[in-house]
Image: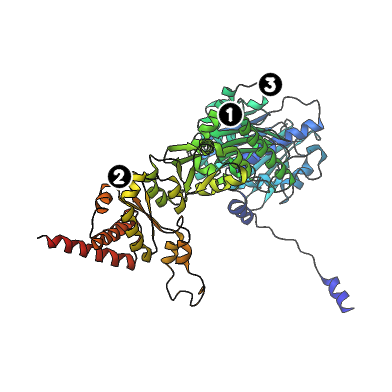
Amino acid sequence: MDDHNNADKTKDYSFQVDLRGIIRLLSENLYSSEDVFLRELLQNAVDAIEARKEAEPEFQGEQIKITYRRETKTGAQLIFADNGIGLTGEEIHTFLSVIGQSSKRGAVERGNFIGQFGIGLLSCFLVADEILVRSSSVKEKKGYRWLGKSDGTYQVAEETEGLPVGTEVILSLKGKMAVRYHEEEVIRLLKEYGFLLRTPVEFDGDGGVRRINDAFIPWRQPFCSNEEILRFGELIFEENFFGAVPIKGEGLSGYAFISRKQTSAASMGAHKIFLKNMLITEDGRELIPKWAFFTRCILNAEDLTPLASREGFVSDYRLSRARGDIEKSIFEYFVALSLYDVNMLKQLTSVHNVAIKSLAVENEKIYKLFFQFLIFASNRGSLTGFQLMEASRRTAVYYCTEVEDYRRAYALLENGAGILINAGYIYDAKLLQLLKRYHPEIRIQVFDEASYGELLEEPEETVRKALEGLMETASGELRPLGCNVALKQFDPPDSPAFYVPGTDGILGEFLTEDSFSGFLEEFDPGSFAQADDSYGTKLYLNGKNALLKRLAQVRDEEITRTMIEVLYVHAMLAGHYTLGEKELRVLNRGLIKLMEYGLEDI
């Protein structure tokens, strides 16, 4: 009973709205810039005209007129006028004076519009302290004026003088806003937002009357040449392009222009994305596929859903469908290029080589389409993926996964058989590894310690016989160091030896007798490596080298062994390998011995 009595005493209160606080929220959180007030006024005018067309199917002569008058150095008047459906007295109270209410809600005659008159009008408070609206509706024979102020107060009165059907929004720009939005800046922004609009938009300023939206729009023409389309793109984006991709999809029209500038996959570039012919955003991340980063797109969508700020789109099935249509259009264009204009695809790939590689490692379609045009560094110069695949059918093709490995091997294979690719750069090794998945018949393999034995030239039998004793001594001397010895011939001839670390050599840098305390006790890495001389750390002696031929004739075994040790460490240094304690001891011992031999003759 007490609860019931308390409930009867409860009073209802209305929320008090701080309009200045709402305006601050609009500025700081909803809109990216005050510039949007021009877009909102344009959109309101367009929506009003579309609503009148639905209410009066015979209506013709639609027009939007913007008037700009500089009143003082720091003051200007801006008037947006349209001959659209107008507002009744009731609608003025309902839609202009209730925060958050939209003139599009429940109004059949306004149809499916994307602007919201009441909400959009609030954006004008970002640049002006007062907004004057004068309007006459097709449903009433009288006009009204509404004066709203940024302090939250407003006035409504009947207009004494006759008004034509339509709406005027009058703003007084003062101080820094008048300076910022001077005549040429307003024209620039209006053109940026509304140059696709079909309704004629005129600007009347101190420079006379000018048309805002009389630009040539290629996709609206019955026929348009490729040169005209490219010229259109160059005017919009102020850069030259390789070509233009027509975008086709449900409710989509426009072009993706292929940039001639080097770009990064991390930057999506500046696009022009319109909704029902009004610019919404320049950010293409929601619509443009990531792999198409080298495009600049101008697109008009008819049925996407805008965010509250109308500076992006709601992530729904419509957005997903549009994204798929755009990706399909661009990809099919490149497929057609690969069939009918390979030269253009080559040029595009050479400009965006690294960036396309970054996407090809993640996207099978991109890989299959672009791999043949991607460029790789090799001992035979820059080669395309296609050239590598073709070469692999006739000769051995290898790739080094580290730049240092490539540099060491390059000198040996420069004039020898086979092709060596420098895949130490980002993405290259992964791309070549993926080749087995997509083209299993192609044999391009990683270059490892065994590859030297396959590619280096075998010595003639006479050379082998002459160096037989030296090879035996070298093998015995270096085996305790975990290094095998092989005889080959390679350039340059003045290089006596070439050092190649095997897996056991790499492990040796980290594993000691105390490592992992008992782990792998039954496993001997050294004996395992020696079980097959094709693998493991190896020193290749050069059968072309004159010094080795002279050393083979020395009868003093101690001198020979010392020279072998010095050659071993010298080959490591020449290959820029780090010397461990063991190698440093060998080097010091060898140098001291050689100095002692030299001093004996003094």
Report how many numbered discs are placed on residues in the image.
Answer: 3
Q: Quadrant of the C terminus?
A: bottom left
Q: Quadrant of residue 58?
A: top right
Secondary structure, mark 3, is loop
The residue that label 3 is drawn on is 222
Crowding around mark 1 (Cα neighbors within 10 Å: few <14, some 14 to 19, many 20+) is some
**Where residue 534 sits: x, y (%)?**
46, 55
Q: Earlier in the sequence, mark 2 or mark 1?
A: 1
Give amino acid for label 1. Answer: Asp
Looking at this view, name the residue that lies furthest to the left.
602
Crowding around mark 3 (Cα neighbors within 10 Å: few <14, some 14 to 19, many 20+) is few
The residue that label 2 is drawn on is 493
Tags 2 and 1 in contact by the CB under 8 Å rule? no
Q: Residue at x 81, y 70 (%)?
A: 10
Q: Earlier in the sequence, mark 2 or mark 3?
A: 3
**Where residue 433 sits: x, y (%)?**
55, 48
Q: Horizontal placement of 326 versus 567: left or right?
A: right
Residue 20's tag is none
Q: Nearer the viewer, mark 3 or mark 1?
A: 3
Crowding around mark 2 (Cα neighbors within 10 Å: few <14, some 14 to 19, many 20+) is some
